[in-house]
Image (spheres, rainbow, N blue to C red):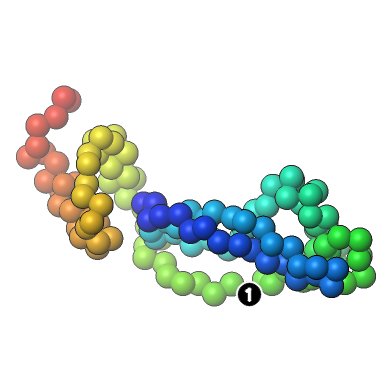
């Protein structure tokens, strides 16, 4: 997983008494999909959000406990590149390329291809091992 950047955005939760707008930062990762956004207890308490896990999963906002917002269980899967992980490659990237300064102007594909070449021919490079 490679971090691609941070998305600054507002999450707006509609409420008859006034919509709730929460400033959020979302970290966008390469080859990673998320099905949930987790709000901390501070947000839940400050904005009066109550999550209920009864027969159906829903949440309420503020004092109005009658208006219930349902959680959707339908997730659209964007992409799965590979479910098989190369643990040796991940270890190589984490340990051997830890201090590598890869040009940030490379595209994701170019960066991925470069790491593949470095991993494939890692014995050709000098190391402290």
In this view, the residue farthest toward the left is 124
Residue 78 shown left or right of residue 41 in the figure: left
Residue furthest front in the image: 18
Q: Position of residue 115 (x, y in %)?
A: 21, 50
Is disc 1 placed on a helix, strand or loop? loop
Within-10-Å neighbours for mark 1: few <14, some 14–19, many 20+ = few
Query: Which residue is rendered at x = 45% and y = 54% of the image?
Result: 6
Q: Nearer the viewer, residue 29 or 121?
A: 29
Q: Please, is residue 16 above or below residue 129 in the view?
A: below
Q: Which residue is mark 1?
A: 74
Is 32 left or right of 20, judged from the image as shown? left
In the depicted structure, whether residue 38 falls above or below residue 125 = below
State whether residue 71 is above or below residue 91.
below
- Image quadrant holding the C terminus, namely top left
Front-most of residues 23 and 67: 23
- Determine whether, in the image, residue 87 is placed left or right of residue 44: left
Residue under the point 21% across and 50% down: 103
- Residue 27, how many percent across, how many down? 48, 54
Residue 42 or 92: which is nearer the viewer? 42
Q: Is residue 117 visible?
A: yes
Towards the viewer: 109 or 23: 23
Residue 41 x/y as whole percent: 74, 46
Farthest top residue in view: 128
Residue occupying image coordinates x 23% and y 56%: 105
């Amino acid at each position: 997983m490679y971090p691609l950047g941070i998305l600054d955005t507002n999450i707006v939760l509609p409420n008859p008494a006034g919509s709730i707008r929460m400033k959020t930062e979302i970290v966008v990762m390469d080859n990673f999909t998320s099905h949930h956004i987790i709000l901390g207890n501070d947000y839940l308490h400050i904005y009066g959000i109550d999550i209920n896990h009864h027969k159906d999963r829903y949440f309420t906002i503020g004092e109005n406990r009658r208006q219930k917002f349902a959680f959707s269980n339908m997730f659209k899967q964007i992409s799965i590149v590979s479910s098989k992980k190369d643990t040796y490659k991940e270890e190589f990237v984490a340990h051997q390329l830890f201090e590598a300064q890869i040009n940030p102007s490379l595209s994701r594909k170019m960066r991925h291809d470069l790491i593949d070449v470095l991993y494939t021919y890692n014995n050709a490079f000098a190391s402290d091992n």
